[in-house]
Amino acid sequence: MSGFYKPNRNPNWNYGGGRWRLSRSKIDLFTNCPKCFYVDNKLGTARPPGFPFNINSAVDTLFKKEFDVHRKAKTAHPIMTQYGVDLVPFAHDSMNEWRENFKGIAIDHKPTGVTVCGAVDDIWVDKEGVLYIVDYKATSKDGKIEALDQDWHIGYKRQMEIYQWLLRQKGFEVSDKGYFVYANASTDEKSFGNKLVFETTLIEYTGDASWIEQTLLNIKTCLDDPRVPKSNEDCDYCRYREAAGKSLLKNKEERVAEKKTLF
């Protein structure tokens, strides 16, 4: 049995348990499929996760080290200068906590009584003290990455909007404008040579967090309902569960029928 996937979670980490919190990724799961969200957070059986992208994590870690140098010096990173962005990395005593998984920026949402949290990659600040959410991304694809124009990029956009909303709940002035620092590994090099060559671009995005409050209320209603919600018709996980269930049931019925013919 794989030790990577643990289908049956300790109830203390489910909704109603003392350790449960509504993370940014759980909000995204709800928007993708209410049924998978409910099975995960209420019933305690999560989707099988994908294996971690270790190279992406390494890029994130190195970006944080790089921007921390400028955070300490209160100077602009070269990519800010390159794109004419008059900002510097934001220095705050809670910065390390806000960037740490399973901690992050956390607030108690009074209308639902739920703790909402999310771990940000970075925050920049302008001369007036306005904050700008920044998210690091890494990939390898043909062409220069200059826009988030694919359907699946909606998850990235929601991610940034949740971080913007969280910091506003903390009392900070946060711009609707945020940035994605996107590192794209080239496959045009002559050889590997024990290194990857990245082209890093800065993508501006103007967020709209107006959807979050109603979504949190919908999540609370969903979790308090004893009935399992309907799945999103585009959810491959639900389609797999349904198809596998039918196949297993058919197999069982066929075996029962075979046994009856023997007697």
Image (cartoon, rainbow, N blue to C red):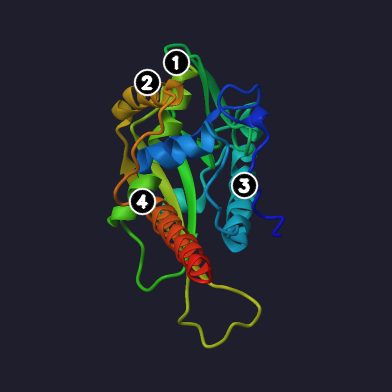
Q: Which residue is mark 1?
A: 112
In the image as oriented, which residue stretches furthest toward the front? 263
**The residue tagged with tag 3: helix, strand or loop?**
loop
Residues tagged 2 and 1 counted as in contact (Cβ below 8 A): yes
Question: Which of the 4 image quarters holds residue 2?
Answer: bottom right
CA–CA distance between discs 2 and 4? Answer: 22 Å
Q: Earlier in the sequence, mark 2 or mark 1?
A: 1
Can residue 16 be seen? yes
Tell me the CA gap for discs 2 and 1.
7 Å
Q: Estimate how packed mark 4 is, as few (under 14), some (14 to 19) or many (20 or more) residues with alpha carbons within 10 Å.
A: some
Q: Look at the numbered disc 2 and give the secondary structure of its residue.
A: helix
Identify the mark nearer the N-term, 3 or 4: 3
Quadrant in the rendering for residue 45: top right
Q: Position of residue 254 (x, y in %)?
A: 45, 66
Q: CA distance from mark 3 to mark 4?
A: 19 Å
**Above or below — where is 92 with respect to 6?**
above
- Tell me the SS state at disc 1: loop
Residue 166 or residue 32, whichever sits in front: 32
Left or right: where 60 falls relative to 29: right
Residue 144: where, in percent of width, then height?
Answer: 35, 67
Looking at the picture, which amino acid does disc 2 mark? Leu
Picture layout, residue 224 above or below residue 260: above
For label 4, the residue is 235
Q: Residue at x 59, y 43 (%)?
A: 70
Residues under numbered marks 2 and 4 in contact, where contact means CB atoms less than 8 Å apart: no
User: Which residue corresponds to the image point at 63% horizontal and 58% vertical from the top-left?
Assistant: 58
Identify the element where label 4 is drawn.
Answer: loop
The residue to which callout 3 is attached is 7
Q: Which residue is mark 2?
A: 217
